[in-house]
Image: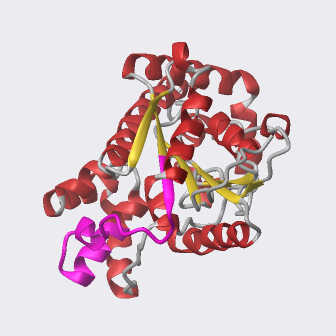
Amino acid sequence: MPVTSSAPAPRVIAVVGPTAAGKSDLGVHLAQRLDGEVINADSMQLYRGMDIGTAKLALAEREGVPHRLLDIWDVTETASVAEYQRLARAEIDRLLAEGRTPVLVGGSGLYVKGAIDALEFPGTDPGVRAVLEAELAEHGSGALHARLAAADPEAGRAILPSNGRRIVRALEVIEITGKPFTANLPGDDAVYDAVQIGVDVARPELDERIALRVDRMWEAGLVDEVRALEAQGLREGRTASRALGYQQVLTSLTGECTEGQARAETVRATKRFARRQDSWFRRDPRVQWLSGAAEHRGELPGQALALVERAVTA
């Protein structure tokens, strides 16, 4: 049953934190209790057909809660935070107009920030972009990442060395604006009154969960999922082909590594990514952290609701 209160509910709830922490289940619970809907803030769950490798909740696991901004892009489409921002705010505004609660759920920090904060995106310069993309093709993402890390150490830490598209974009912004890429990101000026709940799991337990999740993905048919998406153009997708798990399986399908090596590298890469996610959200003092550890799992929904209710009456 939805929570009842004489005070108005906070305008937006955001459930954030690293992969495998338990955000999705908590988001469903909060949306049920707060008469809301879940708005996806995982950049790879935006893609149709990328289900197993992104740990997308099955319909039954959503427990009747509508989930928005899932399965909206083909795998050949290049992700755009600016476009996501437009779509997410449209969903948030619709729910607010209906007197219902938007529950933003995901670990893509820039997407969450784009949805709820005053984030404007610098323009593009086709000439600069073309030069950088040519360098990427010739020298690889590692060389460009080293240049980015020298120009903007914080961006170098935040962007994976393998993510050529984001590295090119960061270097393009630096070239256009003459400022570090991270200097173009605003502070914490909110567009919506939001309660941000971080789900915290200690590193050893989180690493175990990640390894188990990857094992389950393989057992559930991740390799077959990638094969099917490859036929739909996954390799040509500049964003989707870089997704954790998908990138590694694609490499194994060309014979560059064994399937076992791809599986092990997926675990390693996901652990590194989870640390980056955690670092991103830790920098935001507005995020209120709750334990998602196994021994506290039963307490997490109640604690999250208590945070929301405190925000209502504050």
Residue 176 x, y percent position in the rendering: 26, 83
Picture residue at 52% right of the left edge, 66% below the top: 115
Please state if 59 lies on the left or on the right of 253 as rendered: right
Which residue occupies the foreground of this view, 140 or 308? Answer: 308
**Rendering coords of residue 238 (x, y %):** 54, 61
Residue 16 higher or lower than 222, as above or below? below
Q: Quadrant of residue 121?
A: bottom left
Q: Nearer the viewer, residue 259 or 152?
A: 152
Could you say which quadrant of the image residue 57 lies in?
Answer: top right
Evaluate whether residue 109 shows in this view: yes
Residue 153, magenta (yes or no): no
Q: Residue at x 40, y 62 (%)?
A: 166
Task: In the rendered view, tell whether residue 308 sits above or below residue 96.
Answer: above
Q: Nearer the viewer, residue 45 or 257?
A: 45
Residue 46 in sight from this viewpoint: no
Which quadrant is the N terminus positioned in?
Answer: top right
Percent coordinates x, y for residue 123 in the rendering: 39, 85
Residue 170 in magenta? Answer: yes
**Magenta range:** 169-196
Residue under the image location 69 percent in, 33 percent down: 223
